[in-house]
Structures are given as structure tokens and as C-alpha cells.
Image (cartoon, helix red, strand yellow):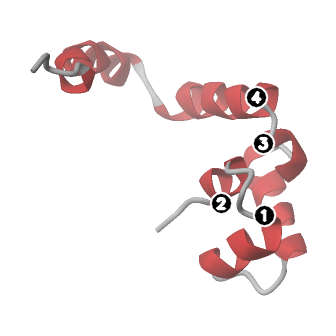
Amino acid sequence: MVSPEWALAHREITTIVAAHRLGFTTGGNLCRTVKSVTGVSSNDICSVHGWNHLLILFAWRFLGRNELAAWETLDNLFQREAA
């Protein structure tokens, strides 16, 4: 399932389309839910500053010392292999 924050971060997707895809009855309901869960307005999420704020908020809330230490082991996962 697509998260409300992710759906709103893509500028080509309108709030109404994102709301419909996520099962909300109106765009307003989606925006209020995002604001209540994240503390960031849907308009702010669409900006680079707002998106960065949301990422930092996520990391602060959900990534502890062990998760951050394990992140270093994923470096090779994101590297492209030269052909």
C-alpha cells in the first residue's frame, strides 16, 4: 500500500487522485490525516524543505541506534555494477 506522504510527494499526482488511491473519500480527509500523523501539511510535503523535514521526522521516530548501525551494511545494495 502507498503511504499518504509518498502519494503527496509526487507533484504529478493531485491530492484528490492520491486520496482516491489511498481509500479516502475526499482530498481534505487525506490532508487532515497526513497533518495529524506527521505534523506536516500536505502543501509542505510537496516542497523539498517539507519532504526533508518528513524524512528527518521519520528517522527520528523510527530509527534507533541498531537500525542506523545496520544501514551501513546496505551500501553495496545501492551501488551499480559497471558493465
Local crowd size for mark 3, using a 10 Å CA cut-off: few (<14), some (14–19), many (≥20): many
Say which element carries label 4.
helix
**Residue placed furthest toward the front:** 83
Q: Which residue is mark 2?
A: 4
Local crowd size for mark 2, using a 10 Å CA cut-off: few (<14), some (14–19), many (≥20): some
- For marks 2 and 3, the one nearer the N-term is 2
**Callouts 2 and 4 close, C-beta under 8 Å:** no
The type of residue carrying mark 1 is Thr
Label 1, label 2: how many angstroms apart (C-alpha)? 8 Å
- For marks 1 and 2, the one nearer the N-term is 2
For residue 33, which numbered disc appears in the image?
A: 1
Q: Which residue is mark 3?
A: 45
x and y, in percent, of residue 5 in the image? 66, 52
Is 74 placed above or below 19 here? above
Mark 1 or 2: the one toward you: 2
Say which element carries label 1.
helix
Label 4, label 3: how many angstroms apart (C-alpha)? 7 Å
- For marks 2 and 4, the one nearer the N-term is 2
x and y, in percent, of residue 54 in the image? 69, 34
**Callouts 4 and 3 close, C-beta under 8 Å:** no
Q: Does residue 60 appear to the left or right of 20 in the view shown?
A: left
Label 2, label 3: how many angstroms apart (C-alpha)? 10 Å
Mark 2 or 4: the one toward you: 4
Q: Which residue is mark 4?
A: 48
The type of residue carrying mark 3 is Ile
Residue 23 image-quadrant placement: bottom right
Label 1, label 3: how many angstroms apart (C-alpha)? 13 Å
Which quadrant: the C terminus? top left
Label 1, label 4: how many angstroms apart (C-alpha)? 20 Å
Q: Nearer the viewer, residue 65 or 21?
A: 21
